[in-house]
Image (cartoon, rainbow, N blue to C red):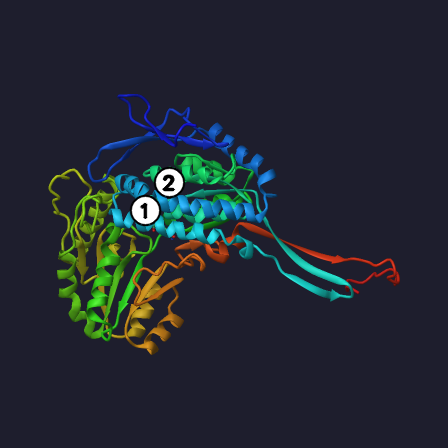
C-alpha cells in the first residue's frame, strides 16, 4: 500500500495523499500548496486541494462503510482503540519530529500535542459504558422504556494548524468508536503529522472506508458542509471560518459543533504565589509562540500585583527563541510568513494606539535560522479595552497587561469580552476562587492553572464567542454529539394477559 506521504520522484517534492476507501491515493487536482518548515522555509512536501469528485468519493466510501461498521460489536471497536493508543505511544517521537518540522513548536511541546490526543484515544476505549442507553422498567402496566444511542452515519471533521495531532484525535477516534464513519479535512498548513496518525489508525485495524481524508481549503470544507450524505460536522479553527461552517452545515440539516477563537485572560490577585504565577503567565503566554486557543493573551493585574510587572518582563526575557527541534528552545517560530506579518501588524497597531511596549520581540535574531518566522516574547502595558491588541486574537507570543483595583472589576472586565474559551485565576484564597468560578462567564476556568484544557473524561467546554453548538469535543458530550437517541417503549404480552379493550386515550395503561 502507498504511504500517506511519498516522494514523487528523485528530484521532486513529496506529496501528501488522500485516503479514500482504505487506499492512500494521489490527487488528480491541479491545485497544490507547499508545506513549509517555519524555522527554515524548506519545502517539506506538497498538499493537494482535492477535487469535488474526490471529496464526493471519500464521502461515498464512508457512507458505504457505515452499513457494516455500525453493526460492529462494541468490543471489536474498543479493541481497535486499545491497539491504536499503543501504536501512537510507540511512534510518538517519530511523529513529534514531523510535527515540529511542519508546525514549528518545540519537540517536547509536539509530544504534548500528541499526548493530549492520545488521552482521547485511551478514553475512546471505554466506549462500552459511555454509549450505554437508559432503561426504565414498568413505566405502565407491563410496559418498559429504553433508549438506544445509535451512530449518525458519515461525520466530517475540519481541523486547524495549531494542534495537528491533538485536534484530529479529538474527532475521528470518538466518532468512529461510536459506530460512525468519518471524513477528515486536516489543516493544509501542516497535514503530515495528522497523516502519520491516520496511517497508524489503519494499522490498528480501522477498516477501509471507515476513516477517509481529503485535503484542501474553502471549497473542500464547503463541500463537506453541504453534501447530502454528511450527517454531522466538527470544526475547530478561527471564529470567522467556524461561524461560516456552523451556518452552512446547519442550513444543510447537519449537526454542527464549532470551537473557535479566543482571548483568554489571567487574573492575578496579590495574594497569589508570586514565583508560580509568573512562571505560569510566561509559559501560557509565550509557549507554542502563543498559538494555542487556550493561550493566556491578557494578564489582569489586580491591586498590588501590579508591582510584579517588571519581574514578568525579566522572566519573559529569559525564554529562548530558536528552532523547535533545537534542545532547550522555549519559543519556536510562528507557523508562516503570513502569520508573522499579521502579528507584527498587530504589534504596530498597539504602538500606534498608545500602549507601552514593555518588551519588544520584533527584532529577535536566531543564528542559523535567519529566515525563520520568529517573534520574541512581547509585552504591552497601558492597554485599554478599545485597542485592537485587546480586542483581536493575536495568536502570537504577545501578552497585553491591564490593571484593575479589585477582583469585582476584573470579573466584570473578563465578562465584557465577547470570547469565552478559557480564563485563569491566581490566588491563595479559596473564597476568592469560589466567587470567581461562580461569577465568571467563561466555559473553562483554571484556578492556579494557566491552560485549563480538560482531560478527556470531561469535555472541552468553551462558551460564548468561542463556540457554536451545544456539545463540545470529547468526553460524554461528544458521545451525545456523535449519536442520536432512539427511545423504545415496549409491551410484551403473555398469552394469558386479559384483553382490556380499545384504548382511545393518550395514557399508557
Ligand atoms: P482557520 O479557521 O484559518 O482554519 C481552520 C480550518 O478551516 C482549516 O482546515 C482550513 O483549511 C479551513 N478554512 C480556512 N479558511 C476557510 C474558509 N474561508 N472557508 C472554509 N474553510 C476554511 O484556523 P487556523 O488558523 O488553522 O487555526 C487557528 C484558529 O483556531 C485560532 O483562531 C484558534 O483560536 C482556533 N482554535 C480554536 C480551538 C478551540 O478549541 N476553541 C482550538 C484550536 C484552535
Q: In which quarter of the image is ligand 1?
A: top left
Residue 326: x, y in percent? 18, 44
On-image quarter of the C terminus: bottom right
Q: How crowded is mark 2: few (under 14 residues within 10 Å), some or many (20 or more)?
A: many
- The quarter of the picture where residue 36 lies is top left
Would residue 384 be visible to someone looking at this image?
no
Would residue 306 be visible to someone looking at this image?
yes
Q: Spatial distance from mark 2 to mark 1, Cα to Cα?
A: 12 Å
Is 505 displayed left or right of 325 in the figure? right
Residue 149: x, y in percent? 60, 53
Residue tagged by mark 1?
A: 162
Q: Which of 325 and 49 is in front in this view?
A: 325
Which residue: 21% across, 63% down?
279
Mark toward the viewer: 2 or 1: 2
Query: Looking at the rendered structure, which numbered label has been put on residue 58?
Result: none
Residue 471: x, y in percent? 49, 55
Which residue: 13% across, 56% down?
317
Is 147 displayed left or right of 478 in the figure? right
Q: How crowded is mark 1: few (under 14 residues within 10 Å), some or many (20 or more)?
A: many
Secondary structure beneath label 1 = loop
- CB within 8 Å, label 2 to label 1: no
Secondary structure beneath label 2 = helix
In the displayed image of the protein, which residue is found farthest to the top? 10
Q: Nearer the viewer, residue 404 or 131?
A: 131
On-image quarter of the N terminus: top left
- The quarter of the picture where residue 313 lies is bottom left
N-term mark: 2 or 1: 1
Residue tagged by mark 2?
A: 194
In the displayed image of the protein, which residue is found farthest to the bottom? 431
Residue 395: x, y in percent? 27, 50
Q: Is mark 1 within 8 Å of ligand 1?
A: yes
In the figure, 317 relative to 272: above or below?
Answer: above
Amino acid at each position: 500500500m502507498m504511504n500517506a506521504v511519498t516522494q514523487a520522484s528523485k528530484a521532486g517534492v513529496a506529496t501528501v495523499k488522500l485516503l479514500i476507501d482504505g487506499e492512500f491515493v494521489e490527487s488528480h487536482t491541479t491545485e497544490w500548496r507547499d508545506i513549509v518548515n517555519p524555522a527554515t522555509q524548506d519545502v517539506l512536501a506538497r498538499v493537494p486541494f482535492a477535487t469535488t469528485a474526490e471529496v464526493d468519493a471519500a464521502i461515498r466510501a464512508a457512507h458505504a462503510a457505515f452499513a457494516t461498521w455500525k453493526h460492529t460489536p462494541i468490543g471489536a471497536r474498543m479493541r481497535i482503540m486499545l491497539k491504536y493508543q499503543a501504536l501512537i505511544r510507540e511512534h510518538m517521537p517519530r511523529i513529534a519530529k514531523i510535527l515540529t518540522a511542519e508546525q514549528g513548536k518545540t519537540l517536547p511541546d509536539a509530544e504534548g500535542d500528541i499526548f493530549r490526543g492520545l488521552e482521547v484515544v485511551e478514553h475512546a476505549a471505554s466506549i462500552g459504558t459511555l454509549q450505554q442507553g437508559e432503561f426504565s422498567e414498568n413505566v405502565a402496566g407491563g410496559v418498559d422504556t429504553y433508549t438506544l444511542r445509535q451512530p449518525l452515519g458519515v461525520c466530517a471533521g475540519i481541523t486547524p494548524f495549531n494542534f495537528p495531532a491533538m485536534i484530529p484525535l479529538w474527532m475521528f477516534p470518538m466518532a468512529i468508536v461510536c459506530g460512525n464513519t468519518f471524513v477528515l479535512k486536516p489543516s493544509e498548513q501542516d497535514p503530515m503529522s495528522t497523516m502519520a496518525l491516520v496511517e497508524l489508525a489503519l494499522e490498528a485495524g480501522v477498516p477501509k472506508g471507515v476513516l477517509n481524508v481529503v485535503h484542501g481549503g474553502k471549497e473542500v470544507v464547503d463541500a463537506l458542509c453541504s453534501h447530502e450524505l454528511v450527517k454531522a460536522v466538527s470544526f475547530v479553527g478561527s471564529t470567522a471560518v467556524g461561524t461560516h461552517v456552523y451556518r452552512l452545515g446547519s442550513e444543510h440539516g447537519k449537526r454542527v459543533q464549532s470551537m473557535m477563537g479566543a482571548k483568554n485572560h489571567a487574573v492575578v490577585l496579590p495574594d497569589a504565589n508570586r514565583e508560580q504565577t509568573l512562571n505560569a503567565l510566561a509559559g501560557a503566554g509565550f509557549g507554542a509562540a502563543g498559538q494555542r486557543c487556550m493561550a493566556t493573551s491578557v494578564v489582569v493585574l489586580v491591586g498590588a500585583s501590579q508591582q510584579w510587572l517588571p519581574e514578568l518582563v525579566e522572566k519573559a526575557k529569559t525564554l529562548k527563541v530558536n528552532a523547535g527541534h533545537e534542545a532547550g528552545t522555549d519559543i519556536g517560530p510562528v507557523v508562516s510568513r503570513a502569520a508573522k506579518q499579521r502579528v507584527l501588524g498587530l504589534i504596530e497597531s498597539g504602538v500606534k494606539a498608545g500602549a507601552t511596549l514593555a518588551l519588544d520581540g520584533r527584532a529577535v535574531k536566531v543564528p542559523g535560522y535567519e529566515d525563520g518566522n520568529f517573534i520574541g516574547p512581547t509585552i504591552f502595558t497601558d492597554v485599554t479595552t478599545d485597542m485592537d491588541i485587546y480586542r483581536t486574537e493575536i495568536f502570537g507570543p504577545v501578552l497585553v497587561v491591564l490593571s484593575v483595583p479589585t477582583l469585582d472589576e476584573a470579573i466584570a472586565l473578563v465578562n465584557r469580552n465577547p470570547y469565552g474559551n478559557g480564563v485563569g485565576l491566581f490566588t491563595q484564597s479559596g473564597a476568592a476562587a469560589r466567587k470567581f468560578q461562580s461569577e465568571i462567564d467563561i466555559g473553562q476556568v483554571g484556578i492556579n492553572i494557566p491552560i485549563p484544557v480538560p482531560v478527556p473524561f470531561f469535555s472541552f467546554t468553551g462558551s460564548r464567542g468561542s463556540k457554536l453548538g451545544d456539545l463540545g469535543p470529547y468526553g460524554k458530550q461528544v458521545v451525545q454529539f456523535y449519536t442520536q437517541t432512539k427511545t423504545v417503549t415496549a409491551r410484551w404480552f403473555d398469552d394469558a394477559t386479559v384483553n382490556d379493550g380499545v384504548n382511545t386515550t393518550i395514557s399508557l395503561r
